Image (spheres, grey):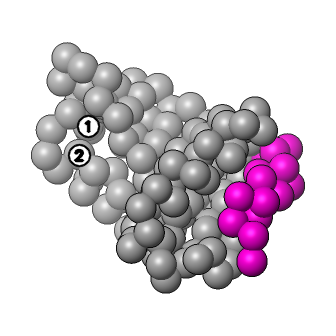
Amino acid sequence: MIEKIEQNMNIARVTVNKVLDRYGVAAELFGALGEHGLNIELISTSSTGRGRADISFAVMRSDLDQVVTLLEKIKGKFGGQVVVVDENCALITIYGTKLATTPGVAGRIFKALSENGINIDMISASLSVISVVIAKDQVTTAISAIKKEFPA
């Protein structure tokens, strides 16, 4: 079921707090990053209510200074109030062609992490990939927990 697990210890999580919750904000923000040659590893958004949202994304740590500098310049265009950075994180990516056709896989992964005291900061899922951002010092434990839950 799980074919491969990869880790990326060289990422940082960036959150732009309280952007306007309206169409076009994500296009503007990520368009600007792309125009500057900056690639995004994972994106997560959450509504904070009252017409505002937080947009979090993972970037390579080598791009972090350039990302933050750009965001500080443009955040006002879309109402962003604060740019928050977390460099103490890592990305775990789980690959499996049967992830989409096997009910409960995501729940089992999240439960295995939870039972090992691991908090998930960001989640992304597609038909064959589940990615999570967690604290960097918990990567080894997380991968062990996932492998234990899904033995080869």
Relative to 129, is 30 above or below? above
**Residue drawn at point x = 58 percent, y = 39 percent:** 121
Q: Residues within 10 Å of mark 1 (few under 14, many from 20)?
A: some
Q: Is residue 74 visible?
A: yes
Q: Main secondary structure of the magenta part?
A: helix
Q: Please say whether residue 87 is one of the residues in the magenta stretch.
A: no
Query: Mark 1 or mark 2, which is nearer to you?
Result: 2
Taking the spot 75% from the left edge, 33% from the top edge, the residue there is 117
Residue 14 in the image, given as x and y percentages of width and height: 55, 42
Quadrant location, the N terminus: bottom right
Classify the position of the C terminus by image quarter: bottom right
Residue 108 image offset from top left, x and y in percent: 58, 52
Query: Would you place residue 115 above or below residue 152 in this image?
Result: above
Residue tagged 1? 78
Residue 107 in the image: state x and y as whole percent. Answer: 51, 49
The one of 117 and 59 positioned closer to us in this rendering: 117
Range of residues picked out in magenta:
136-152
Residue 138: say if magenta.
yes
Say what amino acid the circle numbered 1 marks: Phe
* Residue sitting at the far top: 50
Instruction: State if disc 2 and disc 1 touch (CB < 8 Å).
Output: yes
Q: Which residue is mark 2?
A: 25
Instruction: Using the numbered discs, state the Cα–Cα distance from disc 1 to disc 2 in whole angstroms.
Output: 6 Å
Q: Is residue 75 visible?
A: no
Residue type highlighted by circle 2 = Val
